[in-house]
Amino acid sequence: MGNELRILLQLQGVSQEITQLERQLSLAQKRLVELKTFETKARNEVTHLEAQVVQIRKLSKDKESELQATEDKLSHLRKRDSEVRTPKEYEAFEREIESLEKKRSQLEEEILSLMDKEDALLQKIAETKNKVAMELEETETERKRLESITQRNEALRAALLQDEQRFLASLPDNLSATYKSLIKRHGLPVVVEIKGESCSGCGTILPTGVIQQLRTKVEFTECPHCLRIIFAKSEEPHEKGE
């Protein structure tokens, strides 16, 4: 195997490692975003429940104030029973008393219901906080692991990018440009071995002349169809024709 083909294959190996690392980095970053979203949602779950408690307490306070006002009105009204003179006035007096007592009873039931809701919410908050704490502990462990892997992979990627540039610089400018152009066009791999009579990159059957040329005269050439760099692997030392 000649020097240029060897460099091309080494270069491609490095490029493939970089691509794999970039895929891993992308997946790790996506997962980190998912973890952050999950953590925010978990914390918001507790915040939402606590906001409901605040709302219930405010409503309870309003109901208690209304209940107190109703009881005060009832007390004041009962003190006026001696002022009732006629049956008609007495009937109206009784209706008003009955209405206020009904309202008082309804308010008392509403306050008790709100107290029950508050107790249930407080219990749910305690349970949710415990659940969220365990979940956040797990996500924190995973986040730290992913950040460590990301840091390591970024350092490795930086080193491989330097290797890639070094290999590219050691090739003729036209061959280096061809390699980069092929990657943009096809993605990896762009340096491929022929399989039988076909290009293993695109699967096209190659002209007999191209196959013969690869086996007797040149180390590599381009596929007439996809333009990838193709070569014929041989256990024997490559011999160029005259």
Image (cartoon, rainbow, N blue to C red):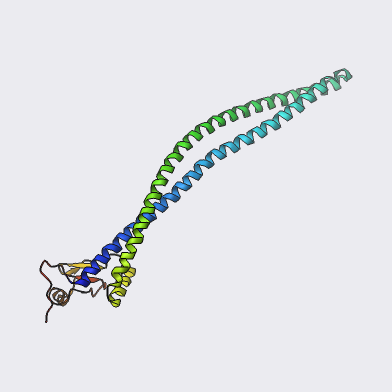
User: Toward the viewer: 45 or 64?
Assistant: 45
Whether 9 is drawn above or below 174: the answer is: above
Which residue is depicted at the point 20% across and 71% down? 3
* Residue located at (87% from left, 17% from top): 82
Residue 116 appears left or right of 97: left
Task: Name above or below for residue 38 compared with residue 15.
Answer: above
- Name the residue furthest left: 236
Where residue 166 appears, as percent x and y from the top left, is 30, 68
Quadrant occupied by the C terminus: bottom left
> Picture quarter containing residue 135?
top left
x and y, in percent, of residue 63 in the image: 70, 30
User: Is residue 71 toward the left or the right of residue 59 in the image?
Assistant: right
Q: Residue furthest top?
A: 82
Specify the farthest residue to the bottom. Answer: 242
Report the front residue among 56 and 95. 56
Nearer to the camera, 92 or 51:
51
Residue 16 sits in quarter: bottom left
Residue 99 point in image, percent of width and height: 75, 25
Quadrant occupied by the N terminus = bottom left
Horizontal relation, residue 184 to residue 215: left or right: right
Which residue is at the front of the view, 107 or 184? 184
Q: Is residue 204 visible?
A: no
Label count reads 0
Q: Is residue 77 above or below residue 201?
A: above
Answer whether residue 200 is visible to the viewer in this image. Answer: yes
User: Looking at the image, which residue is at 72% across and 25% down?
Assistant: 104
